[in-house]
């Protein structure tokens, strides 16, 4: 059971979240080539070790988070909001 | 007569409380405090089961949860539970148990003939014997194997009991309440940490209850009781008895099973049978003890062969003599205590057989004092007897096997050494390491916040256990933020060395071939391990799978290290080179019911009901599940009305007059902000920037891979204010999708949105008379001029505030009304009342589905995640000069080219025959034999009252250009073929004149 530290909700069980894929790949620009778009969707890495990935606090505050996680040990190094525009998480529940 | 094997005194049983039970139908008596195993032994019952593969007679080998042999079916009827270990079942009055793996009876088992054919059943027999021909697998082999090698049978009736799931947080979790665990719990608790202590037994104390130890000048079990009493008085401590920690998961989350009611015939009213606990500890102190391993000698599986520690436990804890004449066999000092304890209980110790040449002098003297014969440099070569031990053949460990000494006995208590219980440590992700001084594996470097102490860490001295417990508990409290005070460890009054010398496999008498069992539950012999190694399956993981060693319900608790050692001997390598398998949860078998907890039957999933639900129920509507929603499917009007009768009647009433339907379950998302239109423009394939206020538009959205994701209408309610509807099925995922793009990709868009599905009740009013009906209750002009097709506006339905949408799913003149959910039922009733003169009626999802097929609207079965906008005939909507999600990947040439499955209409050409969902669409000149001959499939079917024939939607290869073709719809499961005509998917009113009327 992963325990994910949501910046707004505090440490919560993994089953409140849904996994959202690799956070290191960048969505291509609108005018990028078809090839870029193809690779964006279909050719993804499956790294063993520290990795940045998206998690959605879908059964919580519904924020999308960037979680730095070791895919081998499951150690989580950090969690941060994916959006720069969400309300300040200060005063978070702990 | 009965209980003739009781000792005259001692034990933690209440001899004043007699409990009656039956085993294989025969009545027996035991005492309060017995396990089923101890009560059977007290009655002289030694044969309790047959083995899995060879159906060999098996008895009771241990006194704990590691038991490989004595597994029985417990209880009868719906509470019947197979594969329960007799050694862990607390005896209760009226208990019913039956032996397993035997037919027709335990004493005479036909399948024991397998014993004679054992060469066929050696390592890898599944792979060799049952290899060929493949067709034999389903027809012959599987059938035979299942009959011959079952492990008990489960009840087929529903479980009458319930199970709970609970969560608890603490600073320090202590696993096991033996001398180390009790010390640790007390030390951490005194530092005021929140402590949880779990132990699988009903009474705390662990090994102190099995042994004649003395601590601080009193009996060990008495000391344990005192600590228990102290812990119970502290507010910061929770003690869980009958609770086994079975899983150590990531992020220091652990799970335990509390057997709340298993020690009773039935649970108390309102109490669960079992409870699953998820604990969130700051630190875990593992004081789970150690498990003795048997010696590997000939017929070591025979009833009467027992672990030396188990024999002690039966005498000391249960007041039971596991035999009358005992041979004690060992390779270490520990079993000497068995000889002494059994001797004092009145059991005749015929010999202590020690494989070591020079045992501990003090122990030798002690045996001499008791006049017990000691044989050094020797071991048991084989156990002999019919269905139970009657004598042992003793051989020397130096290989002189031609002159074995025969010693009469009915009990062989053996010790091959002790294995620390490293299972939880291993489950936590750590790697155990081999310790040569105890010839076993001990915990390695911790990977999570855990530490093992006492016997679980390989420290077998009582004083070490007590001291390590105190320091681990103190440290754990400090590590979780508590100031600890100094606490002295309790004093152990007796001590002895362990002094093990390796003896992994015994020489056999006369060098004959004997069955020397390693894994007794899966019937794996030493020769199977050797054979696997010879055949090249000599890595630990291969050995395990090839021989099934350690894969039974006991997970090889008593057998794994012996198997590894024998494999190491075979490979000629030191044991640590061979490695160790990874332990995985659960540590003990856990009933499926406890994982389900309360989420069974009615509570399996939440149910969502609309505001109209009660009215629908009163009308006798038949419901259908749509996701979590319950929707009215059709409304029978008189007894005997079938679904077909109903949906045809409801469809005709709609098309010819007016009818209303509950459409609340559609997903609804309120979207506001200056960039709302831009946001929609990026989500949908069509244009949204110029949609005027007061207008509705149909939209389709793609996934990033170019496939259609969802469709629905979105309305422009006011400046910067939109209202989106989604399909019922995708409501949640569309919202998550929007949040993903808004938060991650386009945070610059000034827009907010949230789900309002529950906030609004949706009612569609459809049919040529729908306007006439609405005009009676509505306060705005809804003439075609004032409120044309695809308009939206606010209004009052009588006194209810409402939103009105001029949209149509049925293809008729139609409106959708949204009212706040609290007014839902009232609005429904007022519409019905207003329409009384018009003879308004209601329709359900079947009629809704019929009309959507007639109208060719795509829905969930066509939006199957593999269809593009072009496949679905929606490409005309797309504006490819703007950017939208999925644009680039939907333009890949193969998706735009020929050969795609495209949506078509299908008409049955055979009278009174409807199409079937899932039927393959096939060229009539081809007989369908392989999937590649299928040109598509039927996705939705109905009978169309309008057309008077069976119609369907389907996905057909290049279907858009094949209208008019005659093909076949083939349903191979029932060998059905139907002639059909391909047509445009819009069957009625293709110009859309009705909806605009
Ligand atoms: Zn959150």
Image (cartoon, rainbow, N blue to C red):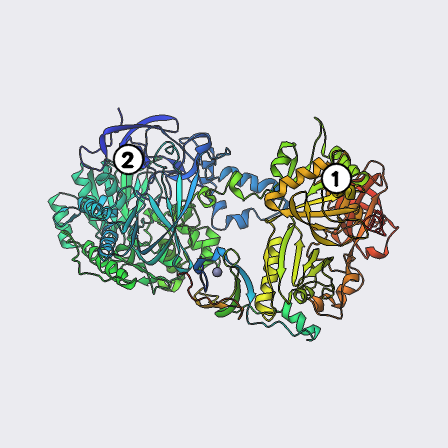
Which residue is at the far right? B964
Nearer the observer, B430 or B509: B430
Q: What's the mark number on residue B659?
A: 1
- Which quadrant of the structure image shows residue B311? top left
The subunit carrying tag 2 is B
Identified at 67% across, 60% down, the residue is B718
How packed mark 2 is, by other alpha carbons closer than 10 Å (few <14, some 14-19, many 20 or more), is many
**Mark 1 on the same chain as mark 2:** yes
Which of pointers 1 and 2 indicates the residue nearer the eye?
1
**Label 2: element kind:** loop
For residue B108, side relative to residue B747 (left or right):
left
| Disc 1 within 8 angstroms of ligand 1 (CB) | no
What chain letter is assigned to the residue under label 1? B
On the rendered structure, is B28 left or right of B224? Answer: right
Q: CA distance from mark 1 to mark 2?
A: 71 Å
Q: Give percent across and percent down for residue B330.
A: 25, 50
Give how far across and how far down residue B516 sits, in percent: 37, 47
Residue sitting nearer the eye, B575 or B816: B816
- Under tag 1, what secondary structure? strand
Residue nearest the viewer, comparing B898 with A79: A79
> Where is residue B137 drawn, in percent x and y?
60, 44
Q: Identify the mark at residue B34; answer none if there is no mark.
A: 2
Q: Residues within 10 Å of mark 1 (few under 14, many from 20)?
A: many
Give the x, y percent position of residue B614: 60, 36
Q: Is residue B415 above or below residue B37?
A: below
Residue B972 in view of the camera: no
Q: Earlier in the sequence, mark 1 or mark 2?
A: 2
Confirm whether residue B775 shows in the render: yes
Quarter of the rendering occupied by the N terminus of chain B: top left
Q: Nearer the viewer, residue B11 or B536?
A: B11
């Amino acid at each position: 059971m992963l325990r994910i530290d949501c910046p707004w909700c505090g440490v919560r069980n993994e089953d409140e979240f849904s996994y959202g894929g690799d956070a290191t790949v960048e969505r291509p620009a609108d005018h990028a080539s078809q090839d870029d778009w193809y690779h964006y969707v279909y050719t993804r890495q499956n790294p063993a070790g520290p990795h940045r990935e998206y998690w959605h606090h879908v059964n919580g505050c519904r924020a999308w988070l960037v979680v730095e996680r070791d895919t081998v040990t499951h150690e989580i190094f950090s969690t941060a909001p994916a959006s720069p525009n969400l309300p300040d998480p200060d005063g978070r529940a702990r | 007569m009965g209980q003739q094997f009781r000792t005259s005194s001692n034990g933690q049983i209440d001899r004043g409380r007699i409990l009656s039970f039956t085993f294989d139908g025969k009545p027996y008596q035991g005492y309060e405090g017995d396990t089923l195993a101890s009560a059977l032994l007290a009655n002289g019952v030694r044969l309790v089961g047959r083995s899995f593969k060879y159906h060999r007679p098996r008895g009771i080998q241990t006194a704990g949860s590691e038991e490989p042999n004595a597994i029985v079916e417990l209880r009868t009827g719906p509470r019947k539970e197979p594969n329960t270990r007799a050694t862990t079942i607390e005896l209760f009055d009226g208990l019913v148990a039956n032996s397993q793996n035997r037919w027709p009876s335990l004493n005479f088992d036909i399948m024991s003939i397998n014993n004679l054919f054992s060469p066929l059943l050696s390592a890898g027999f599944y792979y060799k014997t049952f290899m060929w021909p493949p067709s034999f697998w389903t027809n012959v082999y599987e059938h035979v194997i299942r009959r011959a090698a079952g492990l008990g049978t489960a009840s087929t009736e529903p479980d009458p009991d319930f199970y709970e799931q609970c969560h608890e947080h603490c600073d320090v979790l202590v696993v096991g309440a033996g001398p180390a665990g009790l010390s640790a719990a007390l030390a951490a608790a005194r530092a005021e940490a929140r402590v949880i202590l779990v132990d699988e037994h009903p009474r705390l104390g662990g090994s102190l209850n099995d042994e004649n130890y003395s601590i601080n000048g009193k009996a060990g079990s008495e000391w344990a009781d005192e600590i228990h009493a102290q812990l119970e008085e502290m507010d910061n401590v929770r003690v869980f008895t009958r609770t086994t920690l079975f899983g150590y998961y990531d992020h220091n989350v652990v799970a335990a099973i509390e057997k709340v009611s298993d020690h009773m015939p039935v649970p108390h009213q309102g109490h669960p049978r079992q409870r699953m606990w998820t604990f969130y500890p700051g630190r875990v102190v593992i004081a789970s003890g150690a498990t003795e391993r048997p010696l590997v000698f000939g017929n070591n599986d025979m009833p009467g062969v027992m672990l030396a520690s188990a024999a002690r436990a039966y005498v000391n804890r249960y007041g039971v003599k596991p035999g009358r004449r005992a041979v004690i066999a060992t390779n270490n000092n520990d079993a000497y205590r068995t000889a002494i304890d059994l001797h004092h209980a009145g059991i005749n110790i015929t010999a202590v057989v020690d494989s070591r040449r020079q045992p501990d002098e003090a122990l030798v003297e002690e045996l001499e004092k008791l006049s017990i014969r000691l044989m050094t440099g020797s071991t048991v070569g084989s156990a002999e007897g019919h269905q139970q031990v009657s004598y042992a053949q003793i051989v020397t460990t130096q290989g002189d096997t031609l002159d074995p000494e025969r010693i009469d006995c009915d009990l062989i208590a053996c010790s091959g050494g002790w294995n620390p219980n490293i299972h939880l440590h291993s489950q936590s992700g750590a790697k155990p390491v081999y310790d040569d001084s105890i010839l076993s594996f001990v915990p390695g470097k911790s990977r999570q916040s855990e530490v093992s102490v006492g016997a679980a860490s390989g420290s077998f001295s009582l004083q070490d256990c007590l001291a390590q417990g105190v320091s681990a508990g103190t440290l754990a409290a400090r590590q979780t933020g508590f100031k600890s005070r100094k606490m002295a460890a309790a004093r152990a009054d007796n001590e002895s060395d362990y002094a093990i010398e390796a003896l992994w496999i015994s020489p056999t008498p006369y060098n004959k071939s004997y069955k020397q069992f390693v894994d007794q539950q899966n019937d794996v012999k030493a020769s199977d391990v050797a054979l696997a190694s010879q055949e090249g399956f000599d890595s630990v993981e291969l050995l395990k799978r090839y021989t099934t060693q350690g894969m039974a319900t006991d997970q090889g608790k008593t057998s794994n290290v012996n198997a590894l050692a024998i494999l190491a001997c075979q490979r000629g390598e030191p044991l640590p080179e061979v490695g160790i398998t990874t332990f995985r949860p659960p540590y003990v078998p856990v009933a499926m019911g406890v994982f389900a907890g309360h989420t069974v039957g009615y509570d399996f999933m939440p149910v969502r009901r609309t505001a109209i639900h009660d009215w629908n129920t009163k009308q006798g509507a038949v419901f259908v599940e749509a996701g979590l929603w319950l929707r009215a499917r059709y409304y029978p009007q008189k007894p005997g009305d079938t679904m077909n009768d109903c949906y045809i009647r409801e469809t005709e009433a709609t098309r010819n007059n007016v009818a209303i339907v509950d459409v609340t379950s559609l997903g609804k998302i309120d979207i506001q902000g200056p960039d709302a239109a831009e946001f929609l423009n990026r989500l949908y394939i069509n244009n949204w920037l110029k949609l005027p206020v007061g207008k509705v538009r149909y939209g389709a959205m793609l996934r990033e891979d170019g496939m259609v994701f969802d469709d629905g209408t979105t309305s422009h309610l006011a400046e910067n204010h939109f209202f989106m509807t989604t399909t019922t099925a995708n409501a949640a995922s569309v919202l998550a999708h929007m949040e993903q793009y808004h938060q991650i990709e386009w945070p610059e868009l000034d827009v907010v949105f949230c789900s309002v599905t529950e906030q609004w009740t949706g009612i569609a009013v459809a049919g040529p008379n729908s306007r006439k009906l609405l005009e009676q209750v509505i306060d705005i002009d809804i003439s075609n001029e004032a409120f044309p097709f695809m308009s939206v506006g606010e209004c009052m339905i009588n006194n209810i505030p409402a939103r009105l949408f001029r949209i149509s799913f049925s293809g008729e003149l139609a409106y959708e009304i949204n009212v706040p959910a609290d007014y839902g039922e009232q609005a429904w009733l007022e519409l019905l009342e207003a329409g009384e003169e018009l003879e308004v009626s209601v329709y359900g999802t079947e009629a809704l589905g019929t009309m959507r097929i007639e109208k060719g609207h795509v829905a969930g079965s066509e939006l199957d995640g593999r269809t593009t906008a072009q496949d679905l005939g929606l490409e005309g909507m797309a504006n490819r000069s703007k950017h939208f999600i999925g644009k680039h990947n939907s333009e890949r040439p193969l998706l735009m080219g020929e050969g795609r499955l495209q949506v078509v209409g299908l008409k049955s050409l055979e009278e009174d025959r409807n199409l079937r969902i899932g039927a393959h669409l096939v060229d009539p000149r081809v007989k369908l034999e392989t999937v590649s001959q299928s040109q598509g499939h039927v996705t939705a079917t109905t009978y169309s009252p309008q057309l008077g024939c069976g119609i369907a939607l389907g996905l057909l290869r290049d279907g858009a250009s094949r209208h008019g073709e005659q093909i076949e719809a083939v349903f191979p499961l029932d060998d059905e073929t139907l002639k059909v005509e391909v047509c445009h998917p819009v069957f009625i009113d293709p110009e859309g004149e009705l909806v605009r009327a």
